[in-house]
Amino acid sequence: MGAEESTGERTGEAAASGSGAASGAGGRAPRTALVTALMLAMALAALDSSVVSTAVPQIVGDLGGFSVFSWLFAGYLLAVTVTLPVYGKLSDTFGRKPVLLFGIALFIVGSLLCALAWNMAALIAFRLVQGLGGGALQGTVQTLAADLYPLKDRPRIQARMSSVWAASAVAGPALGGLIASYADWRWIFLINLPLGGLALWMLARHLVEPVRSPGRLGPVDWAGALGVFACGALLLFALVQGGVAWPWLSAPSLGLLGASAALAALVVRIERRAAEPIIPGWVWRRRTIAAVNLALGALGLLMVAPLVFVPTYAQSVLGLGPVSAGLVMSAMTLTWPASAAFSQHVYRRIGFRNSAAVGISLAAAILFAFTLLPYPARPWQPTLVMLLLGAALGLFQLPLIVGVQSTVGWSERGTTTASVLFCRQVGQSLGAALFGAVANATIAARLAHAPMSGLPDHLDDVSKALDRPELLPPAAAGYLRATVAAAVDHIFLGATAAAVAALLVLLLMAPRRFPILEEHQEGRRADT
């Protein structure tokens, strides 16, 4: 019997939100110390990319490898993404604590190796090691947050986790800049050692998982894990390199995409035969989980617009400096946690699905409003858009995560949470590739039909020209800024379409009321 029909489930979120004490992990541990340790572990993963980004010039100046430095981020993202479902299944099989402690330890080892890197190739390889640990941090911390609190209290802990990401987005670039300016870039990785060590010690001491009846014990599906890793690696490699290292329709792109499709078919075959698959079929057979996966995949896709292209817009079109441009984008992270914390008052009245539908509807309107900004806009205008967008997305994401975690028992929560985060990461990777291609096509077309001379002949020269606009004729500089603004408008139209797609998924696939599992039955299998 499916989860949505299993006995013991409530049909209304309002009734479930008043349920009893948590039966999750850490119920016997000092709650404050444990939550602090979880937030510290989350900060390790959240700070990583934002701190490294501002130190790239110093790293490249020391190690070289300018042509491949983007793999410092792509390699880490790849490792995190493809290991999320693996760690999710392992945490359901062996418990959260061993998986999380292993992830933190591996992240610390990767950080130490990064600090000792002797060239760019070594640093990229060690970033992969960091990412292998980061996948355990992201998924397991979110799962433990649901284990620790009953449904009525989960928004509080999830809002705290959101605040960690928000603070990291604001403080990370500044911290990285300070380290790059006044110390050696290797300290960016070395500071992870004491922070990770403290989190490791606190979790080892305070996290005590209750004894649970075995839900799905059996041989670990290592063949499936390896297949998922290889398939995801090939796909993300194709998406990251396509249109950059080679054309999209070239033999390397088509070969990698074809190989990833063949591996995906092989993984499906392996998983169907496995006794305990890494990605079980019920993740996609249950309407609630499948709908949330697709909706948050669309969220990952649309998030590329504000995270990647708004700083470019602020610098190239509005003429702001790097710090000011970062502040325009980070305005979104100020309202997101506040809206997420407030969302509990909304979904207790109208339900998880309807709350998320309201949030993504507002987000679609706000993303479209960005395309209506005047040219040239004043800095406060995109900043206001980002503030409103953060508020809308906080109302969208948190109800879905809290809701879907509450439809499964302990033995399935790690897999469910990992599948949600995996889909969001894949959506972000797809968005980066898709929107990058849209931006390149828009700029190339406008340059080809430019009414004046003096403009760059190649896309690679556009960023250089925008860095030194005084070297261009005034008319050409103005046309180039307008070209970038048009490209960003097209990106936001695509993000609007992604938001509309998420809304349709919720309305057409998700049940009107999520099938909440009784708190006292969370240790049982949800489909028995």
Image (cartoon, helix red, strand yellow):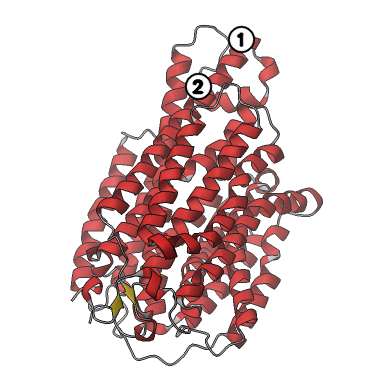
Q: Residue at x 62, y 22 (%)?
A: 465
Q: Nearer the viewer, residue 401 or 486?
A: 401
Query: Above or below — where is 475 with respect to 94?
Result: above
- Is there any visible trace of residue 307 in the rendered image? no
- Which residue is identified by label 1? 475
Q: Which residue is mark 2?
A: 458
Q: Is residue 215 above or below residue 258?
A: below
* In-front residue for pair 350/286: 350
User: In this view, which residue lies farthest toward the right?
Assistant: 182
Q: Is residue 306 left or right of residue 17?
A: right
Q: CA distance from mark 2 to mark 1?
A: 18 Å
What residue appears at the point 37 percent right and 67 percent down from the top-left corner?
404
Relative image position of residue 54 (x, y in whole percent): 67, 47
Q: Report the label total.
A: 2
Secondary structure state at the residue bearing disc 1: helix
Helix, strand or loop at mark 2: loop
The spot of residue 155 in percent (x, y) is 51, 67
Residue 48, picture quadrant: bottom right
Q: Residue at x 49, y 60 (%)?
A: 343
